[in-house]
Image (cartoon, grey):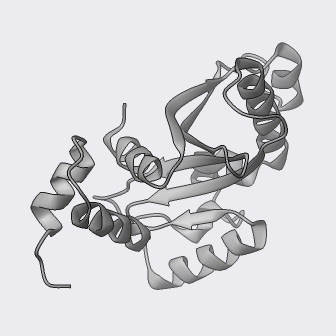
Amino acid sequence: MDSFEQVVAEILWREGYWVRTSLKVELTKEEKRQIQLPSAPRWELDVVAYKAQQNSLLVVECKSYLDSPGVKMHGFDGSNEKAAGRFKLFNKSNVRDVVFNRLRAQLVELGACSPNPSVTLCLACGRIASERDRSKLKEHFAEQRWQLWDEFWLRDRLKSMAAGGYENQVSAVVSKLLLRGRAE
């Protein structure tokens, strides 16, 4: 399991979600044809979080990009095909619709959620390339009704984790070691 995905999952768990990482979506042969990927393996989602009270699912794509330039708007605006390929669920509405419909059906069939949950697509990233990219991404995500969780979102939640009671999770322990008692 990816460490960044685990940190995001632990944050969501603290916020009241039931969480699963590396969830495989079992697309049918017909669904694979619909998305023009007839020989594709099972679709894997980085983090799926469910909140029963609202019957809502969060599908979270995780990109740490900690030692890279970071997420750029060109991965979402159609100007860079290679970058867009890293964000298929965001850039291919047909793929997103098919995967989300199968996810709903799969989780309902398993008894893991109530029928007809809402699904929100989220991007958790450890770094955004520039303030211009951040501004454009925030605007684009708001228009699409997606959620963008950047390094500031992550830090705020880790600070909250550091201030909370002891939990035997790596993210909580590291947060306490690095953040507890530090001046704001």
Q: To which quarter of the image does residue 137 belong?
A: bottom right
Q: Position of residue 48 (x, y in %)?
A: 58, 40
Residue 179 in the figure: left or right of residue 57: left
- Which residue is found at the position 46% from the left and 84% from the top? 131
Image x and y of residue 46, in percent: 52, 38
Looking at the image, residue 59 sits to the left or right of residue 119; the answer is: left
Asked if residue 89 is positioned above or below residue 134 in the image, the reply reads above
Q: Quadrant of the C terminus?
A: bottom left
Is 73 left or right of 149, judged from the image as shown? right
Give whichever of 148, 114 is nearer the camera.
Answer: 114
Q: Is residue 107 above or below residue 151?
A: above
Dividing the picture into quadrants, the one containing residue 28 is top right
How many numbered circles does the render carry? 0
- What residue appears at the point 71 percent right and 23 percent down from the top-left corner? 111
Q: Is residue 89 above or below residue 111?
A: below
The x, y position of residue 128, in whole percent, is: 44, 70
Residue at image x 37%, y 41%? 6
Q: Residue 106: x percent and y percent?
A: 74, 23
Q: Indicate left or right for 63 with 178 as reference.
A: right
